[in-house]
Amino acid sequence: MELPERNLGFLLHDVARLMRKRFEQNARGLGLTRSQCQVLAHLARNEGIQQSGLADILEVEPITLTRLLDRLEEAGFVERRAHATDRRIRQLYLSEKAHPLLADIFTIGAATRAEALEGVAEAERDQLFTLLSRMKSNLLARASTPAGTRSTNDG
């Protein structure tokens, strides 16, 4: 039986959890939660997206995103606008007030990653990124395959 500290899934989960926690600590001065920062960061890269599309990207329930957007809209950071041809569709945009925060959010993200990768050589960082990207690709490729079936590449 594999010990939890030698289990890749546990380790990846713990590292991700600790990075989220550390980001939250580093971002306290912004007055925003990590989740709110995440919404703003993804919205910066996908302005005009529909709420359902952003929920998919963030992998959260639509109601969870609605609550986050309500708070961000109240604070003046996000705007919901009617679609040009379909008034039922609401598109999401950052307000002018949000733009200065983005630099802070991205700086805090970079600082948090730097803390996590302290003492890890550049070549090791590249290798880690390559390996994790390959693992992600492997899992995405199998996501459409029902559990218990094997693809032709499985050996």
Image: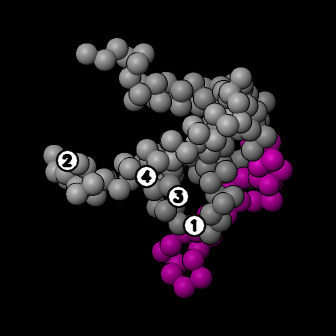
Could you tell me which secondary element the residue under label 4 belongs to?
A: helix
Could you tell me which secondary element the residue under label 1 belongs to?
A: loop
User: With 47 as the anchor, is 148 left or right in this view?
Assistant: left
Amino acid carrying mark 1 in the image: Ile
Q: Is residue 29 visible?
A: yes
Residue furthest to the left: 148
The residue to which callout 4 is attached is 137
* For the residues bearing labels 2 and 3, Cβ distance under 8 angstroms: no
Separation of marks 2 and 3 at Cα, in angstroms: 27 Å
At 70% from the left and 30% from the top, the residue drawn is 121
**Upstream in sequence: badge 4 or badge 3:** 3
Marks 1, 4: nearer the viewer: 4
Marks 2, 4: nearer the viewer: 4
Separation of marks 4 and 3 at Cα, in angstroms: 21 Å
The residue to which callout 2 is attached is 147
The residue to which callout 3 is attached is 54
Separation of marks 1 and 4 at Cα, in angstroms: 25 Å
User: With 145 as the anchor, is 91 left or right in this view?
Assistant: right
Could you tell me which secondary element the residue under label 2 belongs to?
A: loop
Residue 23 location, quadrant: top right
User: With 73 as the anchor, is 54 left or right in this view?
Assistant: left
Residue 48 is one of the magenta-drawn residues: no
Amino acid carrying mark 3 in the image: Leu
Residue furthest to the right: 100
Separation of marks 1 and 3 at Cα, in angstroms: 7 Å
Local crowd at mark 2 within 10 Å, few (<14), some, or many (≥20)? Answer: few
At 57% from the left and 24% from the top, the residue drawn is 18
**Upstream in sequence: badge 2 or badge 1:** 1
The residue to which callout 1 is attached is 49
Pinpoint residue 99: horizontal percent, then vertical percent. Answer: 80, 54
* For the residues bearing labels 1 and 4, Cβ distance under 8 angstroms: no
**Upstream in sequence: badge 1 or badge 4:** 1
